[in-house]
Image: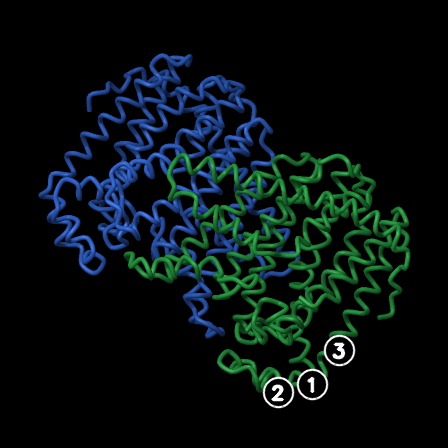
Chain colours: A green, B blue
Amino acid sequence: VTVNVPQTLAQATRAGHDRDRLLSLVDDKMHAFLSGEQAHWLAVDHRSTVLIDAVTQLITAGGKRLRPAFCVSGYLAAGGDPSEDAIIPAAVALELLHACALIHDDVMDESALRRGTPTVHTRFAAEHGSEGWHGQSGRFGESAAILAGDLALVYADRLMAQAPPVAQAAWGELKSELIIGQWMDVLAAARFATDLELARWIAIVKSGRYTIHRPLVVGAIIAGRPELTPAFEAYGTAVGEAFQLRDDLLNVFGDENVTGKPGGLDLEQHKMTLLLTMAINRDERVGRLLPAARDDSSGLLRVLAESGVRDDVEKHIDALVERGCAAIADAPLSTEWHDELIIMAHKVAYRDK
Amino acid sequence: VTVNVPQTLAQATRAGHDRDRLLSLVDDKMHAFLSGEQAHWLAVDHRSTVLIDAVTQLITAGGKRLRPAFCVSGYLAAGGDPSEDAIIPAAVALELLHACALIHDDVMDESALRRGTPTVHTRFAAEHGSEGWHGQSGRFGESAAILAGDLALVYADRLMAQAPPVAQAAWGELKSELIIGQWMDVLAAARFATDLELARWIAIVKSGRYTIHRPLVVGAIIAGRPELTPAFEAYGTAVGEAFQLRDDLLNVFGDENVTGKPGGLDLEQHKMTLLLTMAINRDERVGRLLPAARDDSSGLLRVLAESGVRDDVEKHIDALVERGCAAIADAPLSTEWHDELIIMAHKVAYRDK
């Protein structure tokens, strides 16, 4: 790692403390909203609340709350008042939008596990089967998951409607980019597209913008500092790509006990990740072995290890973190928030789950 | 029909003219928004626009624009200025939300046709098959349709963000009710629930509130007359149930050349509609024949014809239209808009497609 992590831990701790306090209010607000909806619908019909339960369970099962963390950090780094709660609804909206993305993604990828527990569609399909209900269990599970994801998206917008009007445009961009990015991901996998530019673009849209750049900008706008947008965009784009590459590494080489997802997952699902695209462009055996990896990924995993792509990706991550940190070097931020954003870049780029 | 359709056609025409003019602006705005998105993403990558194309195609293929019509009518009936365009974004949002509901509904029901053309998931699955892409064509088609529906919902909220803040709460309620109503529909079909109260509740939530009551109320609120809410709720609930019953009749007994959907559709999909619930409660043979109707619905159609449920439903529709019209009899509306809403109730309750 070529970037120095600042040693000003006393200062960084104060910034981190403000963020953590607001993030705990974000979780409180999210649970209060979901509980309110549950109580409202329970009074109507007890069978109507199970989708709300599904969204609540997913959120309670874990998650890094990365998007709320960057949103709250953007707000505080831009000088937003830590004792005001103007940022809370937007941060909740980001996490609920993410719940929608995960629930629908798991249907599209036919994933069985998420955050160490069965995915929404898997759980509903199992209930359908054990109850002996009419129709196909798989179809029922997917219908429930489509609607649970829709509900999470509806709830995200209900929260965002409580945020200042000035933040709505960036929120609209963020959502559109997320969906279009997901689509390009699905299309690239189906077309077996090994185009490096496309793979980078998908990583930037899906992770850079959606996870880091736009949440930071929403925070800065709510703090009244939209002029921070270019610096946060450059930082978020680079650090987001590093985040996505780490995700790719963890999905292929990660330890299931730590990540909560089985290793080799992207290989089995034929996902055309940035990592795989880099590997195919480096070693032609990877492209030849990939189609068979759905059933058995061990051969491909061995070739990937031999190919040296792992070292390549680690070096690329280092360069991206360096570039991201450089992007905020001259931004008008307090020293403590400048340092805190550098620490956050390292945390997302070098995490182990 | 026991309700008198007003003969004051000259007056009704003026109200209808104002509505039709605003509705043509609604379609203009919707197409301008979608074209703007298309141009924006085309500049990024030509492959990224196909979901926008899918939403645009569905909207262009037809549709009654019922929700925009009730929204604009609520606005005008409440005295909203016909020369102002404050109501336009909300009306567009309602039609885009409906596009989301239809696209996701067609995945859940595995429907092949919508508005006389192949459904979104069917079209994408066919393209995947003919191009010989990787993975399963059915899964690819459904993934594309899940994302196209998500995008329509995202776009609906982007439009609604342009509407006056005062309308946001009703919009939030409307969306939540739609999703929970869809869920109860899926659950009732799976559980083979023949509970009349539940079937009526689903019809009221999915059609009464989502199609008529809430769009009218959003219009009235934007016109600055929230006090019309109770009258519009009573009208919309009754007329919406009539609308749903007509839908049920058309789906079971309708002429495919007129409706654009094959007859007997609800029987093949095991949908536990209000019509079927009424039929099961009237003639026990219906419940016995229903499970086999997925493959061949002719026997069940004969029993349904014999059962007299069609006449029952027609009488119930008459009573609902009468109740809906009575609900606005004393509301503080102009004569022409009182009459126009009565005409609209008859149009939705006695339509042939």
Disc 2 chain ID: A
Mark 2 — residue?
A285
Q: Is residue B78 left or right of residue A15?
A: left
The Cα–Cα distance between marks 1 and 3, rounded to whole angstroms, is 10 Å
Q: Is residue A184 left or right of residue A80?
A: left
Disc 3 chain ID: A
The Cα–Cα distance between marks 1 and 2, rounded to whole angstroms, is 9 Å
Mark 1 — residue?
A307
- The amino acid sitting under disc 1 is Ser
Q: Position of residue A302 (x, y in %)?
A: 63, 86
- The amino acid sitting under disc 3 is Asp
Discs 2 and 3 share one subunit:
yes
Mark 3 — residue?
A312
In this view, A136 is above or below B37: below
Q: Earlier in the sequence, mark 1 or mark 2?
A: 2
> At x 49% / y 74%, what residue is drawn?
B134
> At x 47% / y 18%, what residue is drawn?
B78
| In front of the other: B28 or A80 | A80
Q: Earlier in the sequence, mark 2 or mark 3?
A: 2
Foreground mark, 1 or 2? 1
Q: Position of residue A240 (x, y in %)?
A: 72, 60
Callouts 1 and 2 close, C-beta under 8 Å: yes
